[in-house]
Structures are given as C-alpha cells and as structure tokens.
Amino acid sequence: MEEIRKIFIVGAGTMGSGIAQTAAVSGYQVTLMDVIPEQIERAQLVIAKSVEKLASKEKISSVQKEAALLIDTTTDLQQLPETDLVIEAATENPQLKFKIFEDLDKRAHPETILASNTSSISLTKLGASTQRPEKVVGMHFFNPVPLMRLVEVIRGLQTSDETTETVIELARQMGKVPVEAKDSPGFISNRILCPMINEAIFTLQEGIGTAEAIDEVMKLGMNHPMGPLALGDLIGLDVILSIMEVLHRDLGEDKYRPCPLLHQMVDAGYLGRKSGKGFYEYK
C-alpha cells in the first residue's frame, strides 16, 4: 500500500470544500483548486464556519481547526504540486471530468493516484482516458462530507488492488466507513436513491400530493430522516438530473427516465439549496 501524505482536490464547491476540510483535520497536507477565485473564497468561508462550529462542540481540536484554516489554494491546474493523491470533485459532467483526468494524467507524477468523487460516471471510462488506469479509482463522499461517514469506493475494470487498498485505508484514516461498489451506473447509492427522488418528483408533477405531503409520508411512514424532495434540494437538482440521465442512457430502461418537472426545475435555475430555490425556498 502507498502512503498518502499530500492530497490535491479539484473543485471547491460543496463536495470539494467538504473533502478538503475532512482531509485537513485528519492530518493530511491539502491543496484545494478551482478555476473560479470566488469559489475558493466561498469555500474558505464555509470551511471556517464549519470548523468553528465543530471546535465549539469539541468535535475537533484547536490544532485540527487551524489545519483546516491553513489549506493551500490555487486556481491553476497547470501548477499541480507534487502530491500523492488527487481527488476530483468537479461538476457531475462527463466531458468535464474526462478533460480534467486527461490534464491530471499529463501533469501528475506517474505514481500519483487519481480519484474521482463522481456519483455515477464510469470509473473504467475515466481510467481509460489516462495512461495510468490501474491508479484511477472512485471515492464517492456524501454531503455534508465532514459529518457523513460513508465513502463508496469504486474500482474500474483496470483499478489495481494496491490502489483500492490505499484509498480504503485513507477513508478509514479520515474517520469514514469505506464500502466497495462495482463500477456500474449510479453504483449502489445513487442506483437506489436517485430513482426514488425522481419518482417523488413524478408524484408531485401528477398532483398526487404537495411537496410537504410527499416528504412527510416518507419521513413518518418510512422513517427517513429527510423527505426525498428536500433531499433532492440538498444534493442539487442538477446533480439528480445528471445522474438520472446517466442511468437512463447506460441502463437503457424507461424506469430511469428523468421526470419532465425535474428538467424544468433545472432549466429554470431552481437547483435547490445552492440556488436558494428548489422544491422549497431557502434564505
């Protein structure tokens, strides 16, 4: 197994900033990269607020808090520093991810592991876009990353045992519970979760119940901590749509057809919490 000390994270959005924070408080040297400077600034504010809250509740130490506040940042992928692991956490867009992996493959040391936080895209295909497919692996974290314990570890057809074992141990060192999943559309989590959210949106579209009624039924009747529509808002409706499109295309079954209302919501820019409006409104 390789020893991981330095981690480079591509994408300073909700997931990337959460992964950066988690890695930093776990003792890793972290660099967070995004092409948009304002996104990095927002990530730093979010991380600072998060670690302040965790420290006040004595969930992390003052040393861990300070480590998260000292995360290195950059806006230039071409200046990729020497690193043991890259975790890509960009938007769930296949073309963008393939381009990032091609660039990373050219610039990273040959021994560097390239991991993706993708929630649905084939790791086998991502690996094939590089000259190091045996070192390409999926590390699917869950939102909010600092609090959610699960990490889905997905190995592509070419991923080596050594790479898989390394990221499994890394996840454990981060305080997470790694679970291996086959490289299949949506893996385990989103193969089950996103069709449920999509069906809830169909239920709303057909007027069977209000958003509040649908969520209340699932919370009280099925003991879910959060209703599917509120959860969709938390994840991001654009992300849900992207995953459903992958499932529909790659599995070829109509039961994975994205709901027309989901398309409309995304077209309108109603993406959920991150845009201030989804099935619910947020301040």
Image (tube, rainbow, N blue to C red):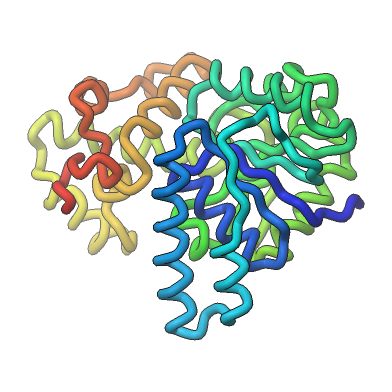
**Residue 138 in view of the camera:** yes
Which residue is nearer to you in this view: 28 or 251? 28
> Residue 171, position in %: x, y?
70, 57
Figure quadrant of residue 174: bottom right
Figure quadrant of residue 261: top left
User: Is 248 located above or below residue 75 in the figure?
Assistant: above
Question: Which residue is at a point 42% across and 41% down the rendered structure image?
Answer: 39
> Residue 116, position in %: x, y?
64, 36
Left or right: residue 188 versus residue 136 is left
Figure quadrant of residue 13: top left
Question: Which residue is at a point 58% across and 81% down the rendered structure image?
Answer: 61
Question: Which residue is at a point 64% across and 30% down the rendered structure image?
Answer: 77
Left or right: residue 262 versus residue 52 is left
> Residue 28, position in %: x, y?
72, 60
Left or right: residue 224 versus residue 138 is left
**Residue 119 in view of the camera:** no
Which residue is nearer to you in this view: 194 or 21? 21
User: Is 30 located above or below residue 173 in the figure?
Assistant: above
> Residue 220, position in %: x, y?
23, 63
Question: Which residue is at a point 21% across and 33% down the rendered structure image?
Answer: 270
Left or right: residue 76 versus residue 265 is right
Number of marks drawn: 0
